[in-house]
Image (cartoon, grey):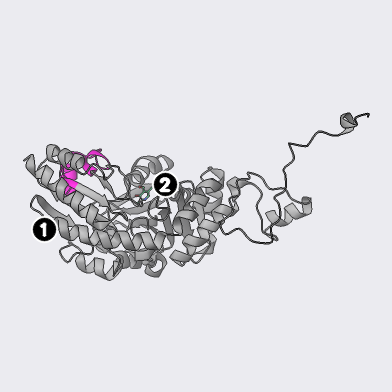
Amino acid sequence: MASNRSNQRPPNLVRRTPMPSSASVAVGTPLQPAVVYASPDADALDDQYEGRASGYTYAREGHPNADVVAAKIDALEASPTPGIMLGSGMGAISAVFLGLLKAGDHIVAGDQLYGRSLRLLTQDLPRFGIECTFVDAGDAANVAAAMRPETKLVMVEVVSNPTLRIADLDGIAAITAHHQALLMMDNTFTTPRAIRAYDHGADIVIHSVTKLLAGHSDVTLGYASVADPGLRQPIVDAAVTWGLTPSPWDCWMAERGMHSFDLRFDRAQQTAGQIADRLAGLAGVEAVIYPGRADHPDAEKAQALLGQNPGNMVSFRISGGRAQANAFIRAAGEIPFAPTLGDIGTTLSHPASSSHRGLTAAGRAELGIDEGFFRLSVGIEDPDLLLSELTAAVAAAQATL
Ligand SMILES: Cc1ncc(COP(=O)(O)O)c(C=O)c1O
């Protein structure tokens, strides 16, 4: 029998195979990794570009997974406008600056911001003609004194890193509004669970989603949103033009992590309170800084701003120097010694050898950071396990004195 095989076209492997239809709906969030989107014709594409129809064209300019995770953070922050996803927390901060500032503008910023934010403000923005004055954000009078006619933006983190001091947020918001400048709040540490930034007069909110929101140390992602709809597009354009937008995969991972954000936050915070109290009672612990404790240096402000949500970060100082710090780290060996925060598991950081290593010892001392100073980002492990590990680590450090 003659074969007609030679007349058959080979299967078209290049064309995409359509997804099978299903009467039931997938429960998981779909991941859409496509870089480009096809339109039915040129008019339809026109409609999209002109905003008459919604849809996606090119992933750097937007994709469904970014919008899905942004909507989730928008809901937590009660954001007045749709959030913008960026490739990292630093990407979010950069997109805001690139989109809204120009040469000649001036920024007032808290002097204990995240280290890379400080670097951006001190070393990079000046190259573009933008100056920054740093102030202790604990007192709004310091912000008032630093304001200039050309001050365009005030940047704060409500809880400082790693000394966990509390910014005078409402006072700063009033001064910023009086000067018709923009208040930008980095809400990474506090999260919208503790503070809804827009309720406190923020004009711009940014997040390192990498941290508590995504929560599993396997995603690097950022978020920015604004109160005034007119400020949104310049930030979007900066992000798209400078290539700061994120991949669908990272957005998908973050959205997945966020399903448990509330539960993780509550559990970690509860354990953080227990750890702070336990550490405060141990010989060899000289100081504990936790915004939920009555002996916190800004206890009243913390109570007023954070209420029942003092957070999962605990800082403390043990007696001794580098040798005791090393003994502590080694004895707490199951707790990763890693300069991050917001992971599902507890992590331990030592600012003198990591985030604040660039300062002189005197500069660190001014902030209250010495070799015995540690910061814990508390996770969701069994609290009793953590308490026994930390108690043993303090004893091990004491034994070397
Ligand atoms: C408060 C704060 N803001 C911003 C960032 C930067 O975020 P990312 O590492 O996602 O760029 C960090 C990172 O640790 C941070 O702690």
Residue at left offset 77%, top offset 52%: 40
Residue under pointer 1:
281
Q: For the N terminus, give its image quadrant.
A: top right
Residue at left offset 11%, top offset 58%: 281
Q: Is residue 376 visible?
A: yes
Q: Image height check: is 218 above or below 282? A: above
Q: Position of residue 301 (x, y in %)?
A: 24, 67
Q: For the C terminus, give its image quadrant.
A: top left
Q: Position of residue 201 (x, y in %)?
A: 39, 67
Residue under pointer 2:
90
Left or right: 167 in relation to 252: left
Q: Earlier in the sequence, mark 2 or mark 1?
A: 2
The verdict on residue 99 being magenta is no
Left or right: 334 in relation to 70: left
Residue at left offset 35%, top offset 60%: 265
Q: Position of residue 214 (x, y in %)?
A: 43, 53
Q: Name which residue type carries label 1.
A: Gly
Question: Of helix, strand and loop, which one carries label 2?
Answer: helix
The residue at label 2 has a CB less than 8 Å from ligand 1: yes
Depth order, front residue of 28/237: 28
Residue 334 picture quarter: top left
Disc 2 packing (10 Å; few <14; some 14–19; many ≥20):
many
Residue at left offset 13%, top offset 54%: 287
The magenta span reads 351-373
Left or right: 48 in relation to 318: right
Q: Residue furthest right?
A: 1
Q: Position of residue 299 (x, y in %)?
A: 20, 66
Question: Of helix, strand and loop, which one carries label 1?
Answer: loop
Left or right: 220 in relation to 380: right
